[in-house]
Amino acid sequence: MLKYFQLSALILTLLVIIPCLYRTLQHYLKKHDINILKVLLILIKKRLLYPHSKKDIKIPIDSQAIPLKKGKDCLLMTACIDVGKTPFVTIRNSQDRLNQYLRSVILWIIRSDIKNIIFCENSGFQYDYGFLKDLAGIYGKAIEFIAFNGNDASYSKGKGYGEGEIIKYALNNSKLISPDDMVYKITGRLYMKNFNAIYKEHLANDNVFNKLSYEIDEDKVDARFFKYSVRFYRHYLIDAYKDIDDPKGRYFEHILYSRLKGIDIPSFKLFPDYVGISATSGKDYELTSMDLSWKNMISRLGLYDI
């Protein structure tokens, strides 16, 4: 009789707990936009639309125009401290922006495995970066600070236009970047907690870009962080920023996608775990461990491929 009551109590307990756990899990997945069924449907749809391998449906990089030569790896941090009249920017205070850039540079110096860092700023903001050069020396890093006055066009075209000009200016004027190098471009106020793992994962890849989301009809590239060889960027993207017009809805993310779609380029196998705040929305980029695990799984499936 005792065993019967114990068994009945266990069954009743499970009948109460299991639905509660199910609703809790369902609420969590919904809250964090984790939809397993949706991903499965995207994978099936992708397979139906593109039944062949990537190499069959994508255009390979022109190896004659862009000889794949291995140079050193560099990190290019794009920056605009005094945004002036640039539209669609939430974080506008120059001192706040400077502090965020300084924090980010320090983190890249002391925590990342990258040995060559270029900080390129386009509002001509004057600041003594001597202590950061000293810090880089202590950690065995080469660091370069470039400042120029090139943000005026951003007032009418948007911040993406300015960022494209920064990348071009850095490639043309940096003393650290050479023609055979690979460059990791990062929005300068951001750091990435898992950069070292991504760095090791993609040592063999000269060019790596992520779509902004895993949706099959996504038409934007994540412009915050990507990897490119100098030769590749000069061939495909060096003047892409001239097509940007933020007020008309033509963002840097759109232009990158239109230029790169159809080229056989991998996406990151680990999702970039950003540290920092969006200058456009003011949103904190920090992910929970569950969110990051989910996005890493999506990345492994190749759903961020362009």
Image (tube, helix red, strand yellow):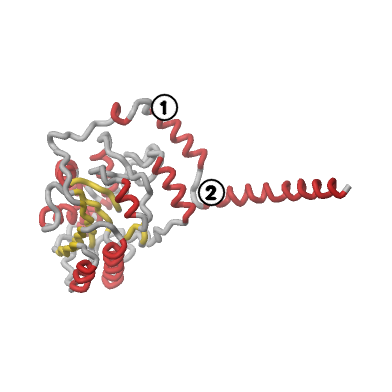
- Residue beneath disc 1: 48
Lateral position of residue 145 relative to residue 52, left or right: left
Disc 2, disc 1: CB below 8 Å? no
- Count of number-bearing discs: 2
> Mark on residue 29?
2
Q: Earlier in the sequence, mark 2 or mark 1?
A: 2
Residue 252 x/y as whole percent? 26, 49
Callout 1: helix, strand or loop? helix
Residue 65 x/y as whole percent? 13, 36
- Asked if one can make out residue 112 in the rendered structure from this viewpoint, the answer is yes
Neighbourhood count class around disc 2 (C-alpha, 10 Å): few under 14, some 14–19, many 20 upward: some
Closer-to-camera residue (289/31): 289
Which residue, as the protein is rendered here, is positioned at the far right?
1
Q: Residue at x 38, y 28 (%)?
A: 49
Q: CA distance from mark 2 to mark 1?
A: 27 Å
Amino acid of disc 1: Leu
Residue 140 x/y as whole percent? 21, 64
- Asked if one can make out residue 156 in the rendered structure from this viewpoint, the answer is no
Residue 139 position (above or below residue 1): below
Amino acid of disc 2: Leu
Callout 2: helix, strand or loop? helix
Residue 227 position (above or below residue 187): above
Closer-to-camera residue (98/228): 228
Residue 45 x/y as whole percent? 43, 31
> Mark on residue 286?
none
